[in-house]
Amino acid sequence: MADHRPSPPAARRTARPGAVPACPSCGDLAGRGYPACRFCAELVDQHRLVDWQELLAAEQLTEGGAGERELAELVLADDTGAHPWTCIDWAMTLTLCSHCGEELGTGPVDCVRCAVADERRRHWDHTGFPKEMSALDHRLRVARVVLRAPHRHRTAIVDTWRLLLPFLLDGRLPATGDVRRLRAQVLAGGYADLAAVTSYDDLVAFPELPWRRSAPVEHQADTQRDQHATRKPFERPADTLPRQQAPQAVEHRDDDQVPAGVDGHPHQGEQQ
């Protein structure tokens, strides 16, 4: 039987910068101005573009040529895992949604085709983990997806990935708890203070906010129990009626979730 190897590796042809410089164009940390700042956009997208250029060369096509968009459509129509994730992302960037006319995956939240395309892209993460896609790859991908379509995600999530992106480009892999703590600080209105930090260690060193910690369940007050005791014998208190337990909300993978490895836990130590 032939050795089937789905989801070829990607983003291995460009080196990490080894530092987090200031962007000469927007003045913020390099990458944080993505995608509006051209320099930041080139820095973030270079990993995808290099892999895409290799695919173009293999197909004897040129960048910007007539066959490039056709190739993008063929790549997106292929089976999951047939192409590197970087090529999938770039093919979506080159493709306009037939329903809303926006870049595929970045249209309005009610665009069905954009939603389906984005979900199909996310399925790649699970087929590619852990050998072909590292935890750092995943988080770089999530950050780019969120920042290219901020209207499709919660503001706190957008701001959190914008803060982290320069350090992800440098190869830093934040722990899940660090991402959540940072998002809590953003929710509390701390984005400006966080954006002024130029060190990754200082960025994730902000303390956990008290209102984000697990609070003990308070016991029912005696006065409330006394009120229930005065009810008619067969009258059941409204707050004790059996209710169907609501399913626990599951975070969409636009924040800090990493596809689990074979042990069921996120891969935290993989850096490029």
Image (cartoon, grey):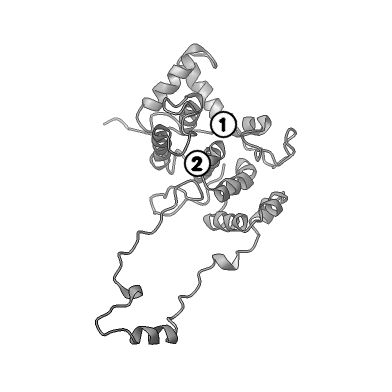
Q: Residue at x 67, y 33 (%)?
A: 37
Question: In the image as oriented, which residue stretches furthest toward the left?
Answer: 234
9 shown above or below 203: above
| Quadrant in which the N terminus appears | top left
x, y percentage for residue 267? 48, 50
Task: Find numbered disc 2 in the image and state the secondary structure of the residue it sits on.
Answer: helix
The answer to whether residue 31 is left or right of residue 211 is: right
x, y percentage for residue 218? 46, 78
Q: How many circles with numbers are drawn on the protein?
A: 2
Task: Find numbered disc 1 in the image and state the secondary structure of the residue it sits on.
Answer: helix
Q: Residue at x 51, y 50 (%)?
A: 256
Asked whether 254 or 165 is in front, the reply is 254
In space, the residues marked 1 and 2 are separated at their CA atoms by 24 Å
Residue that mark 2 sits on: 152
Q: Residue at x 30, y 67 (%)?
A: 243
Query: Which comes before the other along the chain, label 1 or label 2?
Result: 1
The answer to whether residue 126 is left or right of residue 41 is: left
Any part of residue 137 in sight = no
x, y percentage for residue 22? 73, 39
Question: In the image as oriented, which residue stretches furthest toward the front?
Answer: 232
Dots 1, 2 in contact, CB < 8 A: no
Q: Name which quarter of the figure residue 183 lies in.
A: bottom right
Residue that mark 1 sits on: 47
Dot 2 amino acid type: Arg
Asked whether 165 or 237 is in front, the reply is 237
Q: Viewer-nearest of labels 1 and 2?
A: 2
x, y percentage for residue 20? 69, 42
